[in-house]
């Protein structure tokens, strides 16, 4: 029975392709975490926590859009914050003309971001590497200066939205809890869509281009069009995030497009771990929490964060996702070792039992019972623990933190199909 | 739009261009030779200015202060290279961006902690104070001329250094093909440190020179950093000559744009519209120039040989 179940679950995980992966499970973990946050909010800090959560979700969308460029496309955009600003300005300008209704403001924000992405991307994706970094930075600066000179809409001082966007005439977004869950829903939508996009032919071509541009051209793809499409998609998505951000703050200023904000978006992606989709979401959350915590601690929090980033670049460039992946790899090695040991122990016992005399039909139940006891033992701590210790002694990359414990072992059984 | 104003603004533009060249030269060398994207170059410029203020405060002599600040900038550049940047040359651009961004955060805030957030001033030395008559009814500050002269001297010296000395030859060779240079028995690590320290010193020099004109404040390096990026992208990464041409071009266009764009627009547009659009267009002009150059020549005006 146990065997059969194992086979079925193995079959199921093999049949379901890319999206249902470790990535998806971590993402679900993130979504659940974010979803229960408002329920805990009254005890932990009330509305304040809710606002941090809203911002975390919005920046998660922005970081995901940047991950499409960095992780899949290999295009390090250093001007991604421009799209945040454009989305927020489009929504704000619509609102200031009394057009802050969803059916006008949101399409306006998306269209503005897409147009900017198309115009600047047409030039930017012609370049690669450092040139791309520079030129996206330059275009973001252009957007920044346009925003500072928008005298009718606040100029340097920024533009206060008269109200949040109304949905079919209703002011439901005014309610923080509703806004929070709308943001979360949009994030989930973004995650699912991006997951499918990356798993699709388009995503595969994009990743192929990142790995080897020349080879992809040789088999007949036009890198320019794919990169431009990715740039426009990412820009539009980030414009949507900007629209949400403007709604959240009911304010927009040129600072939204500041180049340091672009740098922060890159940090969010890298802190979480590029190459995954759950990474950037956690990265945005951790970055905002870190910013909050450190700024409570000291006015000069950047003195702490700066060196931390340097250390991360030097020693932990995989970010959170990289650390988790490494940990999983080590744990997988240990688990394989442990299960091999358990199998061999069971074989030995079975051989021993087979040599016992037949006790009038008692042997079979006894053997079954002993085997099940051993199964239980093998699956739980002692055997794995011993195997882990031996592995450590043998120098298999491991750390004391790897010592399997009850809870961790059970989580492992859940995680590993 | 009088002729005298045009002349003054041309000189101002030239002075900004020279300053940009000093910053961009180090940046383009570091890019070209090590393929390293150093966002922290701007804070080295800022640090140069702060060090000059402090050195002046300690010695009371402008020129001695400049000398001390220059040496301190060089040492600080070498220290940063040793501690952080050296370990990132072989890495992805992304990690380089992350690390140097962290350095910016640290230094911008660290300067605030050490020197305070209020802007500081460095007085113009008496020798270079005052102004000279340029033409009828038009005087121009001596100090700005001094900046232009110092910058042109450094540029000429740099050009000679890069084209006519052995180390310069290695730098050029490194920009074309660093692994080959290393394979030919050159200690590439020492070359890298040298180039980096030198670049940091040039940036520091620019900061020192501009300190008496601008106020010395945290974050002053950020704006110049982005301009320097524009310069090296227009000029072609790794090319000193390109950096010089592009720096002067950017300096002049930016300065003239800021002074005359609104007036120019007024010729074709309504005054109110011109007043709104003018400043925005002026701020954008150099970025438009960059986009234009890259659209025509994706590798800049003077791409260094051997690079795509």
Image (spheres, coloured by chain):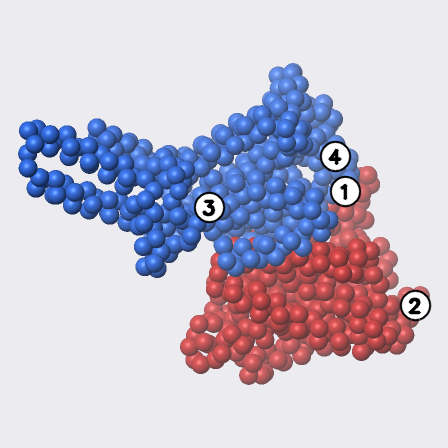
Chain colours: A blue, B red
Circle 2: element type: loop
Q: Nearer the viewer, mark 4 or mark 3?
A: 3
Circle 1: element type: helix
Instruction: Name the residue carrying label 2.
Output: B136
Q: Nearer the viewer, mark 2 or mark 3?
A: 3
Q: Chain of mark 2?
A: B
Q: Are marks 1 and 2 in contact (CB under 8 Å)?
A: no
* Residue positioned most to the top: A169
Circle 3: element type: helix
Q: Are marks 3 and 1 in contact (CB under 8 Å)?
A: no
Residue A156's mark?
A: 1
Marks 4 and 2 sit apart, C-alpha to C-alpha, by 47 Å
Does residue A398 sit above or below B8 in this rendering? above
Marks 4 and 1 sit apart, C-alpha to C-alpha, by 9 Å
Instruction: Name the residue carrying label 3.
Output: A321
Circle 4: element type: strand
x 64%, y 26%: residue: A42
Marks 4 and 3 sit apart, C-alpha to C-alpha, by 37 Å
Does residue B124 sit above or below A336 in this rendering? below
Q: Nearer the viewer, mark 4 or mark 2?
A: 4
Marks 1 and 2 sit apart, C-alpha to C-alpha, by 39 Å
Instruction: Name the residue carrying label 4.
Output: A159
């Amino acid at each position: 029975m146990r065997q059969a179940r194992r086979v079925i679950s193995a079959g199921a995980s093999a049949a379901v392709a890319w999206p249902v992966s470790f990535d998806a499970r971590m993402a679900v973990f993130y979504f659940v975490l974010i979803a229960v946050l408002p329920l805990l909010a009254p005890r932990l800090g009330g509305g304040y926590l809710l606002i941090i959560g809203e911002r975390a979700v919005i920046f998660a969308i922005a970081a995901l859009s940047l991950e499409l460029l960095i992780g899949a496309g290999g295009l390090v955009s250093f001007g991604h914050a421009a799209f945040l600003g454009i989305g927020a300005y489009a929504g704000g300008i619509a609102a200031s003309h009394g057009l802050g209704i969803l059916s006008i403001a949101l399409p306006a924000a998306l269209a503005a971001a897409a147009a900017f992405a198309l115009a600047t991307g047409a030039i930017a994706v012609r370049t690669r590497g450092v040139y791309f970094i520079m030129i996206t930075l330059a275009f973001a600066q252009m957007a920044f200066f346009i925003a500072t000179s928008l005298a009718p809409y606040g100029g340097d001082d920024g533009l206060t939205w008269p109200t949040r966007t109304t949905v079919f005439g209703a002011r439901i977004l005014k309610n923080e809890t509703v806004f929070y869950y709308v943001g979360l829903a949009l994030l989930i939508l973004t995650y699912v869509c991006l997951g499918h996009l990356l798993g699709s032919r388009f995503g595969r071509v994009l990743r192929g281009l990142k790995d080897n541009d020349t080879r992809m051209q040789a088999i007949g793809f036009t890198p320019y069009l794919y990169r431009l499409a990715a740039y426009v998609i990412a820009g539009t998505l980030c414009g949507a995030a900007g629209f949400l951000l403007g709604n959240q703050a009911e304010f927009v200023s040129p600072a939204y497009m500041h180049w340091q904000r672009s740098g922060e978006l890159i940090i969010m992606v890298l802190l979480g771990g590029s190459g995954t989709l759950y990474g950037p979401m956690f990265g945005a959350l951790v970055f905002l929490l870190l910013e909050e915590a450190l700024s409570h601690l000291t006015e000069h929090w950047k003195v702490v964060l700066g060196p931390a980033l340097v250390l991360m670049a030097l020693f932990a460039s995989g970010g959170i996702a990289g650390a988790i992946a490494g940990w999983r790899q080590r744990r997988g090695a240990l688990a394989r070792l442990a299960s091999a040991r358990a199998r061999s122990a069971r074989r030995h016992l079975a051989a021993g039992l087979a040599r016992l005399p037949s006790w009038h039909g008692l042997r079979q139940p006894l053997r079954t019972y002993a085997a099940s006891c051993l199964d239980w033992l093998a699956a739980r701590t002692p055997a794995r623990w011993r195997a882990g210790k031996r592995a450590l002694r043998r120098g298999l990359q491991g750390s004391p933190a790897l010592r399997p414990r009850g809870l961790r072992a059970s989580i492992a059984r859940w995680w590993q199909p | 739009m009088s002729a005298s104003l045009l002349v003054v603004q041309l000189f101002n533009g030239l002075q900004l261009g020279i300053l940009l060249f000093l910053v961009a030269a180090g940046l383009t060398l570091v890019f070209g030779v090590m393929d390293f994207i150093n966002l922290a170059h701007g804070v080295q410029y800022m640090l140069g200015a702060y060090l000059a203020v402090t050195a002046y405060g300690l010695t009371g002599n402008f020129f001695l202060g400049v000398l001390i600040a220059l040496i301190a900038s060089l040492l600080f550049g070498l220290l940063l290279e040793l501690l952080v940047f050296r370990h990132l040359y072989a890495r992805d651009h992304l990690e380089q961006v992350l690390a140097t961004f962290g350095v910016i955060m640290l230094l911008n805030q660290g300067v605030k902690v050490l020197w305070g957030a209020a802007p500081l001033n460095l007085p113009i030395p008496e020798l270079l104070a005052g102004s000279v008559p340029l033409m009828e009814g038009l005087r121009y500050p001596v100090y700005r001329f001094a900046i232009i002269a110092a910058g042109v001297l450094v540029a000429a010296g740099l050009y000679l250094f890069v084209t006519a000395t052995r180390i310069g030859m290695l730098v050029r060779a490194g920009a074309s093909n660093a692994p080959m240079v290393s394979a030919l028995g050159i200690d590439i690590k020492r070359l890298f440190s040298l180039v980096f320290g030198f670049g940091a010193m040039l940036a520091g020099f620019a900061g020192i020179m501009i300190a008496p004109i601008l106020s010395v404040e945290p974050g002053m390096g950020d704006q110049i950093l982005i301009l320097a990026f524009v310069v090296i992208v227009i000029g072609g990464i790794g090319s000193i000559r390109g950096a010089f041409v592009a720096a002067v071009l950017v300096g002049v266009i930016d300065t003239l744009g800021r002074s005359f764009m609104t007036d120019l627009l007024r010729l074709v547009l309504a005054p109110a519209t011109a007043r709104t659009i003018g400043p925005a267009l002026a701020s954008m002009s150099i970025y438009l120039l960059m986009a234009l150059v890259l659209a025509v020549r994706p590798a800049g005006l003077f791409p260094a040989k051997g690079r795509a």
